[in-house]
Amino acid sequence: VGSEMCIRDRPSIVTVANQKGGVGKTTTVVNLASAYAQMGKRVLVVDMDYQANATSLLGAEDKAISTKKTIYRAIIEDLTLKDIRLPTNIEGVDVLAATRDLDLLRDKVVGQPHQFKLLDMLLECDERNEYDLILVDTHPSLDCFFQSAMASSHYYLIPLFAEADPSRGLAHMVTAVDKIRRFLNPMLMLLGCVITRYDKSNATHVRFEKVIREASKTGKFHIFETVIPCLLYTSPS
């Protein structure tokens, strides 16, 4: 992820997404947030996954529940990030926390005028400009939270395993986002795909890495040269 994302007047918004679960979306978000914070950047993590794993990894779960500073409450009461943001266990990183009740909102907002504006509503305040980068974690589905994240983002990033199922799902993911770009956000750009939890001693990983890189040439999407080794793919303490 290039440093150019942090030099615009307003913070760049990057959604990390994949319709395949368990490919490392949350860990990618948390580690990117930590890396940018170590470079002196201020980062906001928006946890739009009702499983709330990013909120938990960032050490904000208990405080979110006790203070009710959650995305669920913000959407229900029309609040913004200034009302609900929480500090995390990483200096320089704040979070808009998810909780399980976020799942209850999906059916309620479908068909409503603001169903594709949920992230815009959260970020609609001057405080967003205190951040250099906003990273959005998503649930592995094409629900309203995913769609609103993509509709409001400048970029998206796809983590995936070098295995059969994630590789097959990549085309579906890109097709789904292309529809969002066509109808909701023509400026949305794919930063690329990052291969995660890679084991160079695993023949399957080696084979599918080659398959993915060949497919990228035909599909004209970027695969980052750096792969994330399985032993290094851990969340920051």
Image: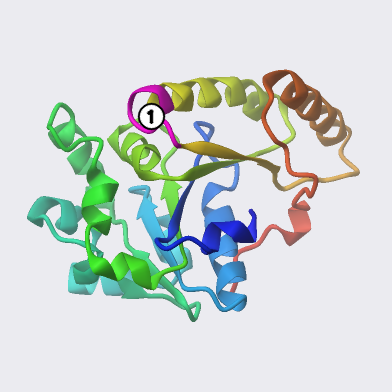
Relative side of 6 to 229, left or right: left
Coordinates of residue 223 in the picture (x, y in percent): 72, 37
**Kind of residue indicated by mark 1:** Leu
- The secondary element bearing badge 1 is classed as loop
Residue plotted at (52% across, 42% down): 156
Magenta residues? 181-187
Query: Residue at label 1?
Result: 142
Q: Is residue 98 visible?
A: yes
Q: In which quarter of the image is residue 11?
A: bottom left
Q: Which of 170 and 148 is in front in this view?
A: 148
Relative side of 22 to 231, left or right: left
Within-10-Å neighbours for mark 1: few <14, some 14–19, many 20+: some
Relative side of 110 to 159, left or right: left
Coordinates of residue 129 in the picture (x, y in percent): 35, 68
Residue plotted at (41% across, 45% down): 153
Residue plotted at (79% across, 29% down): 213
Residue plotted at (24% across, 41% down): 117
Q: Which of 119 and 169 is in front in this view?
A: 119
